[in-house]
Amino acid sequence: MQITADLIVILGTGGTIAGTAKTASDGVGYTAAQLSVEDLLAAVPALASRRLEAHQVAQLDSKDMDFLTWQRLATAVQAQLARPEVGGIVITHGTDTLEETAYFLQRVLAPAKPVVLTAAMRPATALAPDGPQNLFDAVQVAAAPGAEGVVVACAGRVHDATQVRKTHSYRVDAFESVDGALVARVEEGVVRLLGRWPSGEALGLACISRPAERWPRVEIVMNHAGASGAVVDALRAAGVDGLIAAGTGNGTLSVALDTALREAQADGVKVWRSTRCDAGPVMDLPGLLPSAGALSPVKARIELILTLLAG
Ligand code: SIN
């Protein structure tokens, strides 16, 4: 019997999209992660004609996202995608670390079906909440023919997991595809493809099976005027496994920071250079510490964690 893959599974993890404030006019003094994923769906009657299933995987403010939740989420996504009747997944998430979770899931799962993260900048109790529209749009993307890979749907735009960054602390359209094209736009429920769906090779769940408390410790250090090696030395003493240097410009580092990082590297700490610029790659040059390519510092950190887990 032919099974129609028209079921969209919504996985809730918390965030402002599930947040509530005491008054409708309060857009910042709210508490994130208060409403269940079923509550979020109930606020979007326009989705009633869709075949949907909802599961709460976590309930947190995404500033507190952690390895254990990532492990649980990746496992839940994989299990849902394996069901033949599931056409796609939507994950409701906080905006603050959404780009990290999106990148993590893309690298671990590189799914052949769409996995769409969505979020909101305003709590569900706001005068004009953005969550219901974003959730509606995300479901359209998850059900779009030909869609695949991990993307982010917010404010009518669909971003690739590798390109997306939160670039604004307050605006409703807080995300940009900083170093590449948008994947698509969603207009009146119609997904208009502009670029390509993300693809790639999955590292697989086995890569992240180590107990979360024993994942490698990778920290980010920044170059800035007067940057010393003190933070690197302290992290080395604390037993760090990897360091991402958020350098200036093309990943440049002060002499003191560069010296401390090279000493850490000689001591067995894996060190990559990224940039604190909002976009653009760090070019590899002879004699310099290795570059993290075009990955932002937070995504380079995830890549290095996965590399160390695999190694
Ligand atoms: C969060 O990231 O969970 C809170 C902030 C937000 O969702 O905008």
Image (spheres, rainbow, N blue to C red):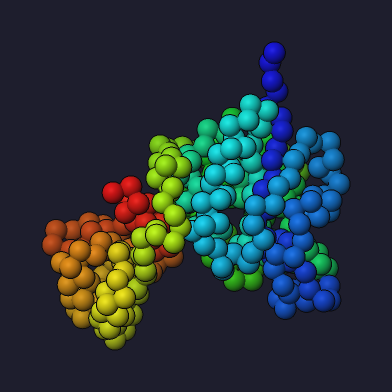
Give the residue at x 59% y 44%. Answer: 76
Give the residue at x 29% y 71%. Answer: 239
Question: Is 308 or 97 nearer to us in this picture?
Answer: 308
Taking the image as drawn, is residue 19 in sight? yes
Vertical position of residue 93 compared to residue 258: above or below: above
Across the whole image, how many numbered discs are drawn on residues? 0
Question: Is 116 or 154 nearer to us in this picture?
Answer: 116
- Provide residue 36's location: percent of width, then percent of height: 76, 57
Taking the image as drawn, is residue 99 in sight? no
Give the residue at x 57% y 50%. Answer: 73
In the rendered structure, the answer to whether residue 247 lies left or right of residue 55 reads: left
Q: Quadrant of residue 261?
A: bottom left
In the rendered structure, the answer to whether residue 206 lies left or right of residue 161 reads: left
- Provide residue 263's location: percent of width, then percent of height: 17, 72
Vertical position of residue 230 compared to residue 196: above or below: below
Q: Outermost residue, left direction?
A: 287
Q: Outermost residue, bottom direction?
A: 226
Q: Quadrant of the N terminus?
A: top right
In the rendered structure, the answer to whether residue 203 lies left or right of residue 154 reads: left
- Provide residue 4's location: percent of width, then percent of height: 70, 23
